[in-house]
Image: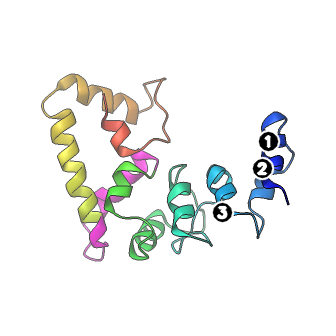
Amino acid sequence: MDWAALEAAHAEEPLPYWQDVVRLDGVPEDVRLRHAALLPEPDPDGLSGSARLTRERARHGLGGQYHCAPSTQLDGLLAAGLLDGADLVRLAAPAAWLLSYLGSAARRTDAPPEAADARTLLADLVRSRLGTDRAAWHRVAERLTGLDPEWDPVSTVEALLAG
């Protein structure tokens, strides 16, 4: 199949059921990577295929599986080496959900060590980007509470802390 032609046709005029097409077995990984937002959310073992697919899909939001607790999902992705601590801060989304996970992981004795790595990175970013700047803290609070209409809630923790 000429995937480049198919993608070009979809870009010109959206093809019906494109989401189902990119999820089919046998779709080249590079095509799936370009359309990662359309892939199913990874379970604790990740998506079938390479770790790159799981990492790329994490950019488009995690924590929305009805049959899998968010902590189970992230614990599994971390334990499997599909995500690492830096990914929780710089790659995965949404920020509010990841902050909640990191807060609860800090109180759990069974949390993966990568969660502690993420909390260390988060603490460094909070010190360097927010520090004692009241306006910066206010901006973050507005974003987290939905009061900033310009804020995309499906953003990373790092983007949340950015100016």
- Specify the amino acid type for callout 1: Ala
- 5 lies left or right of 150: right
What residue span does the magenta drawing correspond to? Answer: 93-114
Going 43% across and 24% down the picture, which residue do you hit? 148
Badge 3 density bin: few <14, some 14–19, many ≥20, Cα 10 Å: some
- The image's mark for residue 29 is 3
Going 31% across and 73% down the picture, which residue do you hit? 112
Please say if 25 is above or below 22. below
Q: Are marks 1 and 2 in contact (CB under 8 Å)?
A: yes
Q: Is residue 81 magenta?
A: no
- Specify the amino acid type for callout 2: Ala
Residue 52 percent across, percent down from the top left? 52, 63
Please say if 60 is above or below 52. above
Please say if 90 is above or below 127. below
- The image's mark for residue 38 is none
Residue 131 percent across, percent down from the top left? 14, 34
For label 2, the SS is helix
Going 40% across and 45% down the picture, which residue do you hit? 96
Single out the mark in the foreground, 2 or 3: 2
Q: Nearer the viewer, residue 110 or 28?
A: 28
Badge 2 density bin: few <14, some 14–19, many ≥20, Cα 10 Å: few
Is residue 100 visible to the viewer in this orientation of the structure? no
* Residue that badge 1 annotates: 8
Q: Nearer the viewer, residue 144 or 112?
A: 112
Q: Can you tell which quarter of the image residue 114 is in?
A: bottom left
Q: Are marks 1 and 3 in contact (CB under 8 Å)?
A: no
Q: Is residue 109 magenta?
A: yes
* Residue that badge 2 annotates: 4
Q: Nearer the viewer, residue 158 or 135?
A: 158
Q: Earlier in the sequence, mark 2 or mark 3?
A: 2
